Amino acid sequence: MKIFLDTANLESIKKFNDMGLLDGITTNPSLMSKEGGNPKDAMEEITKIIQGDVSLEVVSTDYSGMIEEGKRLREYGTNVVVKVPMTPDGLKACKSLSSEGIPVNVTLVFSPNQALLAAKSGAKYVSPFIGRLDDVGQDGMNLIKDIEEIFSNYDFGTEILVASIRHPMHVVDAAKIGADVVTLPPSVLEKMLEHPLTKIGLENFLSDWEKLKSGNPDIKI
Ligand code: E4P
């Protein structure tokens, strides 16, 4: 399963990329706005730091606006995936951009039928938002199971990019289903690294080592 980071925060991107954990990045206008500054600088930097796919989202809602913005976004790098909303114009733009060899991520997917239609339009990725479904009392992970079943029945090359992830168990469940990609807020990836027994275990190893050293101060590994 590929891991993308869902952020426009350069510090987090560098931190987790240096650990070799990142296969790509997803951003959206809200994440850009959260970082402030000029999004152009962020987009330039992110596409340089990350080798894998970087989803950059259009803000136009009409077909020609999306095409124009999509092509401009693609100028940031050959790893740019244009993110379009799951709307009729979004799918039309998806079809045009994909036929020109520009990969597309169809975002704001909330039903199996929307995922099916995005795949038919040639999307490289569909982004079902599971946390937002959980928020309104629907089981987001069921949507991933449904899409996985539908895509595996046919020859769609479209990848399931599980989005709106809120906690580490979402990641475990998505991996068990066999989703292609999860995109994680930095806070979730941080939690996945940790376990209280790892922390306690390391503290014990180090204090035992100090005991050994107190009798032999010259000892070294
Ligand atoms: C995905 O591409 C979206 O940017 C993101 O996962 C949305 O997550 P949220 O529901 O936490 O805003």
Image (spheres, rainbow, N blue to C red):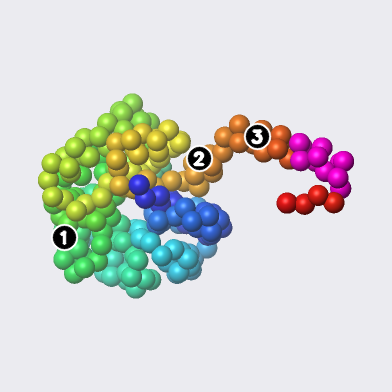
**Dot 2 and dot 1 residues touching (CB under 8 Å):** no
How far across and down, in percent of the image, does residue 10 sit? 52, 60
Work out how far the residue at label 2 is from the one at label 1, CA to CA, in angstroms.
36 Å
Is there a contact, CB below 8 Å, between mark 3 and mark 1? no
Q: What's the residue at 35%, 39% (across, down)?
A: 175
- Range covered by the magenta-colored residues: 207-217
Label 2, label 3: how many angstroms apart (C-alpha)? 17 Å
Residue 40 in sight from this viewpoint? no
Q: Is mark 3 within 8 Å of ligand 1?
A: no
Image quadrant in which you'd find residue 71: bottom left
Residue 150 in the figure: left or right of residue 38:
left
Give the x, y percent position of residue 11: 56, 58
Residue type at mark 1 is: Lys
Q: Which residue is mark 1?
A: 95
Left or right: residue 168 compared with residue 58: right
Residue occupied by mark 2 = 192
**Closest to the observer, 216 or 19:** 216
Q: Amino acid at mark 3?
A: Gly
Compared with 176, 6 (above or below) is below
Q: Quadrant of ligand 1?
A: top left
- Secondary structure beneath label 3: helix
- Name which residue type carries label 2: Met
- Give the residue at x 40% y 35%: 172
* Disc 3: which residue: 201
| Dot placed on the residue nearer the N-terminal end, 2 or 1 | 1
